[in-house]
Amino acid sequence: MESTFSISTSECLTCNNQVLKTLGGLQGIFGAELDRIEGKIVVSHTDEVTRENISKTLIELGFSITDINQEIAHDDPSIWGCAL
């Protein structure tokens, strides 16, 4: 099954790698595609992990999640850049 999340946008490739690594470590997730330009992430997973668990993990990673049916909120670029 696949779950799509509308997320806040950013241009940090280091952060992208950390997100994919963290999601890949969750039981039941076997793939994820992160599109920061469009502001969405598509997660391929089994029934072992719920959409709510994935959403909680994304929020812990610092994303603002919006409902897929709502307009996607794009962040203004930070003047500070990536902290990593």
Image (tube, rainbow, N blue to C red):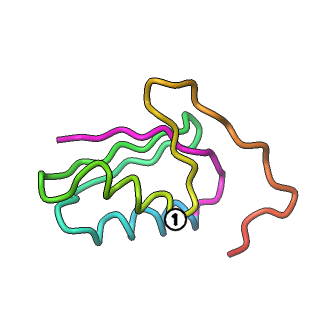
Q: Which residue extends farthest left? A: 47
Relative horizontal placement of residue 81, taking residue 29 as reference (left or right): right
Q: Mark 1: which amino acid?
A: Leu
Q: Residue at x 66, y 52 (%)?
A: 11
Judging by the rendered image, the residue that carries numbered circle 1 is 61
Relative horizontal placement of residue 75, taking residue 63 as reference (left or right): right
Residue 27 on image: x %, y %: 19, 68
Q: Tell me which segment is drawn in magenta.
A: 1-13
Q: Looking at the figure, which quarter contains the C terminus? A: bottom right
Q: Looking at the figure, which quarter contains the N terminus? A: top left
Q: Observer-nearest residue: 71 or 44?
A: 71
Instruction: Give the crowd class for mark 1: few <14, some 14-19, many >=20 residues within 10 Å.
Output: some
Eyeballing the image, is 46 above or below 36? Answer: below
Q: The residue tagged with tag 1: helix, strand or loop?
A: loop
For residue 3: magenta? yes
Q: Which residue extends farthest bottom? A: 84
Eyeballing the image, is 39 above or below 82? Answer: above
Q: Residue at x 55, y 34 (%)?
A: 38
Q: Observer-nearest residue: 83 or 48?
A: 48
Relative horizontal placement of residue 17, taking residue 52 as reference (left or right): right
Q: Observer-nearest residue: 51 or 39?
A: 51
Residue 81 on image: x %, y %: 79, 62
Eyeballing the image, is 40 above or below 29? Answer: above
For residue 5: magenta? yes
